[in-house]
Image (spheres, grey):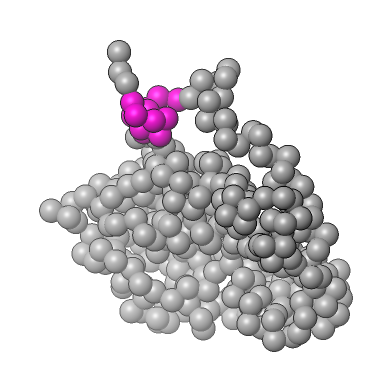
């Protein structure tokens, strides 16, 4: 018989929680209704988002308790949730054809500077370009072959916007075109050769760190997960549950989805995340590539 100090240790050893009594949900279940009410309240108050203190007073909780409970269940703070909802409203207005000025006020932003200081980084492009499905963006890309098959690296003037791995170069190019439908995309095998070489050196276990500029989009939660992935040391692995704990949530599946949405494989090393039983889990570019990447990293430490 084996004993563990807590459920996390048991799950890390490959055991799973009882599917009948759901012991891991002892904290979450009683608070789900509260968190749902907070979400609804925040969504209704996007024009004038409440402070944490105002929110706590409204729901008769302490600010610390409310924030801790909300983040553990949702994965982000109430403020981050409200910002994400406001951004979603802004994006919906743009997609409906509303001009940028009207869209930003309809979404609850108080000035255009809010959009260009806060929203651009989350859209990954200007609001106008987003409204046009990226029309006006210029993306250059190159495709090279190596130990992992074909490697496609796509870049804007700001940084790397996509990395794709596969056995068919043409399919990778089609994936890129589908992802950025209205952007101007052009192959250029001479652009940013230093970035390409850095990625190839990383794959060959000759360079343990990739510190390249990025031009990517993600939700607040996805960005939290991606940042956690970038903190995993070279040659080491973490479980999906480890990452969930690091970003302050029990939503292990949501962490898995964020890993799957990673637009820049290798630079954001989602291949370093495994299941709690030590198995590989998923990987968009194939489990054999994931296995090979992990093996190469271990060799690179020798």
Q: Could you tell whether 9 is left or right of 246 in the image?
A: left
Q: Can residue 209 be seen in this view?
A: yes
* Residue displayed at 69% across by 66% down: 51
Say which of 59 and 156 sits in front. Answer: 59
Label tally? 0
Pinpoint residue 85: horizontal percent, then vertical percent: 73, 61
Residues rendered magenta in the picture: 4-16
* Residue displayed at 39% across by 50% down: 271
Q: Could you tell whether 4 is left or right of 45 in the image?
A: left
Q: In which quarter of the image is residue 202?
A: bottom left
Q: Could you tell whether 97 is left or right of 146 in the image?
A: right
Q: Can residue 174 be seen in this view?
A: no
Say which of 87 and 29 sits in front. Answer: 29
Q: Does the magenta stretch include residue 5?
A: yes
Pinpoint residue 298: horizontal percent, then vertical percent: 21, 50
Q: Could you tell whether 194 is left or right of 72 in the image?
A: left
Pinpoint residue 102: horizontal percent, then vertical percent: 86, 80
* Residue displayed at 58% across by 17% down: 20
Q: In this picture, is 244 found above or below 30?
A: below
Residue lying at the far top of the rendered structure: 1
Say which of 270 and 80 sits in front. Answer: 80
* Residue displayed at 45% across by 41% down: 241
Residue lying at the far left of the rendered structure: 302
Image quarter of the N terminus: top left
Pinpoint residue 265: horizontal percent, then vertical percent: 44, 59
Q: In this picture, is 77 found above or below 3?
A: below
Q: Does the magenta stretch include residue 14?
A: yes
């Amino acid at each position: 018989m084996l004993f563990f100090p807590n459920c996390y240790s048991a799950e890390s050893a490959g055991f799973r929680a009882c599917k009948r009594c759901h012991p891991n949900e002892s904290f979450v279940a009683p608070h789900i209704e509260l968190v749902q009410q907070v979400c609804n309240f925040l969504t209704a108050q996007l024009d004038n988002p409440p402070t944490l203190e105002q929110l706590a007073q409204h729901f008769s909780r302490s600010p610390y308790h409310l924030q801790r409970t909300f983040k553990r269940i949702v994965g982000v703070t109430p403020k981050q949730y409200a910002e994400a909802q406001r951004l979603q409203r802004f994006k919906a207005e743009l997609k409906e054809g509303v001009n940028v000025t009207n869209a930003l006020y309809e979404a609850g932003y108080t000035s255009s500077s809010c959009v260009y200081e806060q929203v651009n980084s989350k859209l990954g492009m200007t609001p106008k370009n987003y409204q046009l499905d990226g029309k006006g963006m210029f993306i250059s890309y190159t495709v090279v072959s190596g130990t992992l098959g074909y490697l496609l690296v796509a870049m804007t003037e700001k940084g790397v916007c996509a990395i794709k791995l596969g056995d068919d170069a043409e399919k990778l190019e089609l994936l890129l075109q589908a992802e950025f439908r209205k952007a101007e995309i052009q192959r250029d095998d001479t652009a940013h050769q230093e970035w390409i070489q850095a990625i190839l050196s990383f794959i060959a276990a000759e360079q343990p760190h990739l510190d390249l500029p990025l031009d990517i989009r993600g939700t607040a939660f996805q960005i939290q997960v991606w940042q956690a992935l970038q903190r995993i040391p070279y040659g080491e692995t973490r479980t999906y549950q480890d990452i969930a704990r690091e970003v302050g949530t029990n939503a292990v599946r949501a962490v898995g989805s964020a890993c799957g949405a990673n637009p820049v494989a290798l630079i954001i090393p989602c291949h370093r995340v495994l299941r709690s039983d030590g198995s590989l889990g998923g990987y968009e570019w194939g489990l054999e590539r994931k296995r090979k990447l992990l093996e190469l990293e271990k060799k690179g430490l020798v």
